[in-house]
Image: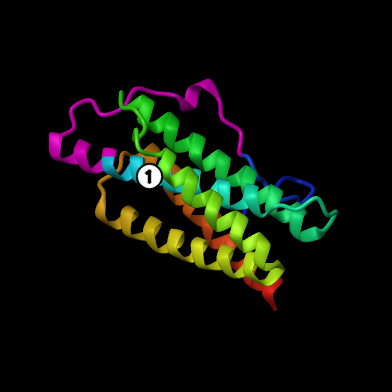
């Protein structure tokens, strides 16, 4: 699910307009809202971890791998913002313990970088594969509103693209 522009370049950060912002959750059951909140908080904290993994895998080298790590980091930052916006649209706040995921992301990113290129890629494939699985489960288990489901599905597609890309770098 790679979005492309007219000249064929992949879209790393999709456009968002004021019309995309709306208050959500009106007339939803408390049970449905509870599941949506849990799902959004989960995705938000996991995307914080993912962006940190890429951030701390980066080296100072001018390589194609670093270029793609920067793009992946930017894409994960976009996902993080997507879910933060959705949390606020529902009137909720991010998980106050999200700082722990920041630390986990730092550890995975920093230590895989210390072990070299192959470990950077293996870590990226492993983490993104888990993300793909998790997104798929959340899409099935939660009765999202249509707009939020679209965002979750789009970001899920990005995660699938990341897995393919990192596997191709490993080959």
Mark 1, residue position: 149
Q: Residue 3 location, x and y as percent?
A: 63, 50
- Can residue 155 be seen here? The reply is no
Locate residue 88, reporting x and y percent: 37, 25
| Residue drawn at point x = 28 percent, y = 38 percent | 37
Residue found at the far right of this picture: 62
Residue at x 39% of width, y 56% of height: 135
Please tell me in which quadrant of the rendered image residue 109 appears: bottom right
Q: Report if residue 68 lies within the magenta region.
A: no
Quarter the C terminus occupies: bottom right
Q: Which residues are magenta?
A: 14-37
Crowding near the residue tagged with mark 1, few <14, some 14–19, many ≥20 C-alpha atoms within 10 Å: some
Q: Position of residue 92 (x, y in %)?
A: 31, 27
Is 121 or 151 nearer to us in this picture? 121
Is 23 part of what is drawn in magenta? yes
Q: Nearer the viewer, residue 58 or 157?
A: 58
Q: What residue is rendered at 34% in x and 22% in y?
A: 23
């Amino acid at each position: 699910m790679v979005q492309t522009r007219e000249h064929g370049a992949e879209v790393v950060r999709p456009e968002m307009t004021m019309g995309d912002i709306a208050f959500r959750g009106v007339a939803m059951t408390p049970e449905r809202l509870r599941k949506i909140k849990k799902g959004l908080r989960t995705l938000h904290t996991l995307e914080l971890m993912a962006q940190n993994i890429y951030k701390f895998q980066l080296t100072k080298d001018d390589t194609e791998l670093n270029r793609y790590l920067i793009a992946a980091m930017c894409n994960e930052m976009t996902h993080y913002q997507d879910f933060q916006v959705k949390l606020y649209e529902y009137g909720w706040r991010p998980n106050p313990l999200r700082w722990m995921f920041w630390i986990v992301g730092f550890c995975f990113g920093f230590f895989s970088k210390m072990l070299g290129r192959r470990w950077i890629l293996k870590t990226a494939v492993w983490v993104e594969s888990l993300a793909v699985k998790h997104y798929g489960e959340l899409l099935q288990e939660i009765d999202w509103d249509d707009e939020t489901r679209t965002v979750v599905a789009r970001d899920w597609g990005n995660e699938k693209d990341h897995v393919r890309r990192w596997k191709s770098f490993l080959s």
